[in-house]
Image (cartoon, helix red, strand yellow):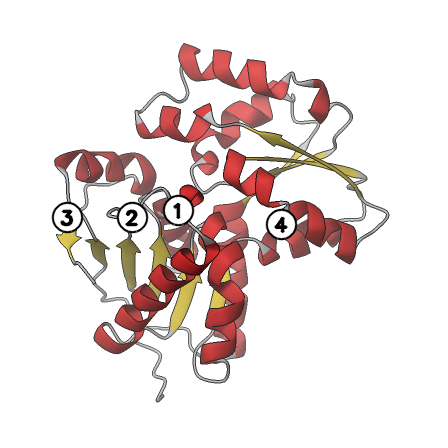
C-alpha cells in the first residue's frame, strides 16, 4: 500500500464521542485532514459480543483504507479498542499504523513515576472488561489501581449537561466514592470525558493528575506519523464525517464534541 503524506487520518467510534479525539488530533496536527466514521447504527458497542464488534471494526477500517485512502487508523473507542485492536494491528502490520485509545494511556501512566495509585473512571462495560486493570497489573505490578464505573456521565454529556450545576452534582457523587480515595492520578477512560476534565480537576483541587485520552492519543499519533515520515505539511485540507445512521440529534450533538458545526454524511457499510 503506497503511502503519501497528504492522505487523511481515519478515525472511528461506535458513535460521536470519539470526536473529542478527532478534535484533539486537529488541534495538535492542524495540517492533517481527517475522515471520521461514527457507527451510530450499531451503538452502543458495550452490549455486543467481541466477535461482532471486531466485525464492525474490520468493515469500517476497510472503508477508511480502500474508499478514503487513509494513511493511519485511530480506534477512538474503548470497547472497540479492547475487542478489535489486535486483529486490526495484525492484519495491517507493515502497511498502515493502527492506534487504539487504551495502550497509549497505559504507557503514559506507567511512565510517570510520581503516580503511585491511579483511578480509572469509565462506562460499566469498560470497567467490567478489566482491560485497564489487566494491563496495569502486567505492565507495572507495583502500581496500585482502582476502577469506578460512572455510567451517567456519557449520556449526561451528550445531552449537553456539563460545566453546570447538574454535572457538578453528578461528578461530586461519583468522585467522592471511597474507591477513588488516595489516588494521585485519574484515567478518563471514555472519549466523552475530556469535556468534563476541568470540572474533574476542580473537584480534586489540582492534586490529582488527570490523564485525558484525547490528548494522549493525539500525541501518540503525532509521534508515529513523525517516525513514519507521514506528517502532512499541506495547510489546505478537508475533513469528512460519516455516520452509519443519521439523525438530526446526532448532528446537533457533534458541536458538543468537536466544538464546531459539522455536516454528517450517511454511509451504511
Q: Residues within 10 Å of mark 2 (few under 14, many from 20)?
A: some
In front: 126, or 232? 126
Q: Say if mark 1 contacts mark 2, CB within 8 Å.
A: yes
Residue bearing mark 4? 131
Q: Say if mark 3 contacts mark 2, CB within 8 Å.
A: no
Residue bearing mark 3? 263
Looking at the image, which residue sits at the far right? 142
Horizontally, is 145 left or right of 62 in the view?
Answer: right
Horizontally, is 63 left or right of 1 in the view?
Answer: left
Q: Earlier in the sequence, mark 3 or mark 2?
A: 2
* Residue 233 picture location, percent across and down: 35, 73
Q: Earlier in the sequence, mark 3 or mark 1?
A: 1
Residue bearing mark 1? 45
Residue bearing mark 2? 42
Residue at x 50%, y 64% (from the top left corner):
85
Q: Residues within 10 Å of mark 1 (few under 14, many from 20)?
A: many
Q: Earlier in the sequence, mark 2 or mark 4?
A: 2
Residue at x 41%, y 50% (from the top left corner):
21
- How far, Cα to Cα, is label 2 from label 4? 22 Å
* Residue 265 picture location, percent across and down: 14, 54
Q: Earlier in the sequence, mark 1 or mark 4?
A: 1
Position of residue 19 relative to residue 179, above or below, is: below
In front: 140, or 225? 140
Residue at disc 2, secondary structure:
loop
Q: Is residue 211 visible?
A: no
Amino acid at each position: 500500500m503506497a503511502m503519501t503524506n497528504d492522505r487523511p487520518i481515519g478515525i472511528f467510534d461506535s458513535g460521536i464521542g470519539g470526536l473529542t479525539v478527532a478534535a484533539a488530533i486537529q488541534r495538535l496536527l492542524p495540517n492533517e485532514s481527517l475522515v471520521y466514521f461514527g457507527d451510530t447504527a450499531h451503538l452502543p458497542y458495550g452490549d455486543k459480543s467481541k466477535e461482532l464488534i471486531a466485525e464492525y471494526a474490520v468493515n469500517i477500517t476497510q472503508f477508511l483504507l480502500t474508499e478514503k485512502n487513509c494513511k493511519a487508523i485511530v480506534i477512538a473507542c474503548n470497547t472497540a479498542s479492547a475487542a478489535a485492536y489486535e486483529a486490526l494491528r495484525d492484519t495491517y502490520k507493515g502497511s498502515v499504523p493502527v492506534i487504539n485509545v487504551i495502550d497509549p494511556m497505559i504507557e503514559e501512566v506507567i511512565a510517570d513515576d510520581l503516580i503511585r495509585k491511579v483511578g480509572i473512571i469509565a462506562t460499566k462495560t469498560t470497567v467490567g472488561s478489566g482491560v485497564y486493570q489487566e494491563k496495569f497489573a502486567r505492565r507495572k505490578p507495583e502500581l496500585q489501581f482502582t476502577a469506578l464505573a460512572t455510567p451517567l456521565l456519557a449520556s449526561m454529556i451528550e445531552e449537553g449537561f456539563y460545566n453546570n450545576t447538574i454535572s457538578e452534582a453528578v461528578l461530586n457523587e461519583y468522585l467522592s466514592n471511597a474507591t477513588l480515595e488516595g489516588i494521585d492520578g485519574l484515567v478518563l477512560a471514555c472519549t466523552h470525558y475530556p469535556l468534563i476534565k476541568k470540572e474533574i480537576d476542580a473537584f480534586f483541587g489540582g492534586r490529582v493528575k488527570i490523564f485525558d485520552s484525547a490528548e494522549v492519543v493525539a500525541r501518540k499519533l503525532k509521534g508515529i506519523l513523525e517516525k513514519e515520515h507521514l506528517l502532512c505539511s499541506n495547510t489546505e485540507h478537508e475533513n469528512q464525517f460519516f455516520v452509519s445512521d443519521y439523525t438530526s440529534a446526532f448532528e446537533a450533538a457533534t458541536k458538543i464534541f468537536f466544538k464546531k458545526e459539522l455536516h454528517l454524511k450517511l454511509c451504511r457499510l
